[in-house]
Amino acid sequence: MILTLTLNPSVDISYVIEDFQLDTVNRVSNIDKTAGEKGLNVTRVLNQLNESVIASGLIGGQLGEFIEQQLEDSHIKHSFFKIKDVTRNCIAILHQGKQTEILEKGPTISKKEGQNFLEHVDELIRQTKVVVISGSLPKGLNNNYYLKIIEKCHDEQVPLILDSSGETLVSSLKGLHKPTVIKPNIDELYQLLDRPVDESIDGLKQAVNDSLFKDIEWVIVSLGAKGMFAKHHNQYYKVNIPSIKVLNPVGSGDSTVAGIASALLNNESDDELLKKANTLGMLNAQESRTGYVNIKNYDELYHQIELLEV
Ligand code: ADP
């Protein structure tokens, strides 16, 4: 089983208001509400792959219950930890061909809740074979909070994929033990290294050899339409992907992470892991819904991917 951790989930609301106006009343009839945040996208894609997955994280109030209900409606197992403060909404208004977003910061976690959640996760890690941590930390938890989960996975010898960014990711890489996989996109890589990265093979090799990434088994840099660059131990790969019709690439990175988790669970080869990750990223980009893939098109895309040892 794969455990996904989403510490600051949201109920994402999408309002379609073609003629959106400021400083007046806008009425909306086309509304979509979904359980959101990166970890839940990963969960949904794993479920579509028919992998056994359990979602956990921190939720509170009625929006937290909405998230649990949505997962149950999709027959996805969950074991969230309940907090006193309430889960957030994130709103996207689709108007005049544009997207305006209003993102709540979300709840504040008390010290005690933070400690108790670690015990809750400890129990779950013992029952799982792969752990995925996605996204940002909620208020109240220190930037090094994920380090404690990384240590627990190390003790249990459970591989861990960490897909986060900024200070939280930097702090999570400074511990004695490391995540098994990180998957920054190219912008996140710039941000981590605090300098522009030359996107040639040599430039990418130099970037992933930065001391920040020392002892991380897999450093996978996703490059959008340009595929992926990866370092596994001392082996480097470039993945070239076909050109596809893209509807909505949001969540492609999360689909990629689902593919990596599935490949680790099934002890697949480097070739299979990287091709699976890219196939799922592309399948997500071909759909309008975030965190949704049409598995029927899987084989056709998979066989068009080129993997080069570089
Ligand atoms: P993130 O969502 O984390 O920014 P990327 O945009 O790099 O991640 O996308 C992850 C993967 O999804 C890519 O490696 C690629 O396989 C696929 N993908 C994303 N955008 C496109 C695109 N425009 N065309 C084809 N594939 C894409």
Image: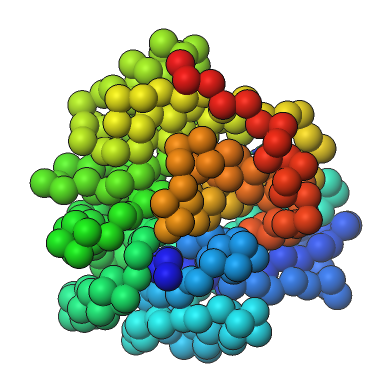
Q: Nearer the viewer, residue 164 or 206?
A: 206
Depth order, front residue of 220/190: 220
Q: Residue at x 33, y 16 (%)?
A: 206
x, y percent for residue 240: 62, 25
- Along the line of sight, the residue nearer the viewer: 20 or 302: 302
- Residue 135 appears at what percent x and percent y? 43, 56
Residue at horizontal 69 percent and vertical 60 percent from the top: 292
Q: Would residue 133 be visible to someone looking at this image?
A: yes
Q: Is residue 149 left or right of residue 269?
A: left
**Residue 218 appears at what percent x and percent y?**
35, 38
* In this picture, residue 132 sits left or right of residue 225: left
Question: Could one spot residue 66 in this view of the protein?
Answer: no
Residue 169 lies, with reference to residue 236, above or below; the image says below
In the rendered image, the vertical position of residue 196 relative to residue 74, given as above or below = above
Q: Quadrant of ligand 1?
A: top right
State the quadrant of the N terminus. bottom left
Residue beneath the point at 20% across and 64% down: 156
66 relative to 293, above or below: below
